[in-house]
Amino acid sequence: MTNFIGEFDCKLDAKGRLMVPSGLRKQLSPAANESFVINRGFEKCLVLYPKNDWDRISAEVNQLNQYVKKNRDFIRYFYRGASELALDGTGRILLPKRLQEYGGLGKEVVLFAYSDRIEVWDKNTYEGLLTDEPEDFANLAEEVMGNKPLQNPDENVS
């Protein structure tokens, strides 16, 4: 599994192509083979997955019981707009127009990379999201992470 980290300011060209920063390309595992899947994310961003990570996540989604309406709804929303992309010879990907519209992407975008995904945000939307940071981040951290058991530092972390 990929473990991305970083925040990158980028620009879309007139055709909707995005240059994937070299700092992100260096973090790609060879298993990704410079192939990606992009789809709609939460809060009006797009999510870019290395193809090998998408395959793993997609396999989990495909195990949902499709006889349950909420599951079918989730599956439809999850896959809606999903498109395979590959880096071109200059390290760019072409974002589908429909997804650009969904994300409200302008010329300036921010790539927020964490875990196995890269969120693609319109720069103004992303900056607005960050200004809504909770007044007391420490309380939020305690609420979200406080009940998580601590790991022994001698244990292997995978």
Image (cartoon, grey):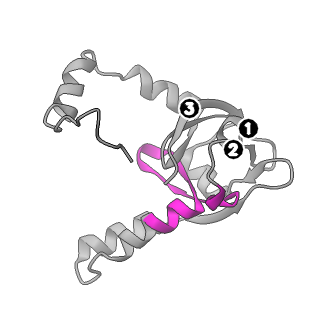
Q: Residue furthest left?
A: 147
Residue 51 visible (yes or no): yes
Which residue is located at x 33 percent, y 76 percent? 63
Q: Amino acid at mark 1?
A: Ser
Along the line of sight, which residue is nearer the eye, 125 or 29? 29
Q: Which residue is mark 3?
A: 6
**Spatial CA span between label 2 and label 3:** 12 Å
**Spatial CA span between label 2 and label 1:** 5 Å
Which residue is located at x 35 percent, y 22 percent? 133
Along the line of sight, which residue is nearer the eye, 73 or 54? 54
Quadrant of the rendered image containing residue 155? top left
Q: Which of the two discs, 2 and 3, labels the residue nearer the N terminus?
A: 3
Badge 2 vs badge 3, beta-carbon distance below 8 Å:
no
Residue 97 lies left or right of residue 154; in this view the side is right
Which residue is located at x 80 percent, y 50 percent? 15
Q: Which mark is residue 130?
A: none
| Magenta highlight range | 30-56
Q: Amino acid at mark 3?
A: Gly
Which type of secondary structure does the marked residue at label 1 adopt?
helix
Q: Is residue 30 above or below residue 149?
A: below
Quadrant of the rendered image containing residue 34? bottom right
Q: Which residue is mark 1?
A: 22
**Spatial CA span between label 3 and label 1:** 12 Å
Badge 2 vs badge 1, beta-carbon distance below 8 Å:
yes
Quadrant of the rendered image containing residue 6? top right
Q: Residue furthest top?
A: 135
Q: Residue furthest right?
A: 89
Q: Which residue is mark 2?
A: 25
Q: Which of the two discs, 3 and 1, labels the residue nearer the N terminus?
A: 3
Q: Amino acid at mark 2?
A: Arg
Residue 131 lies left or right of residue 28; in this view the side is left
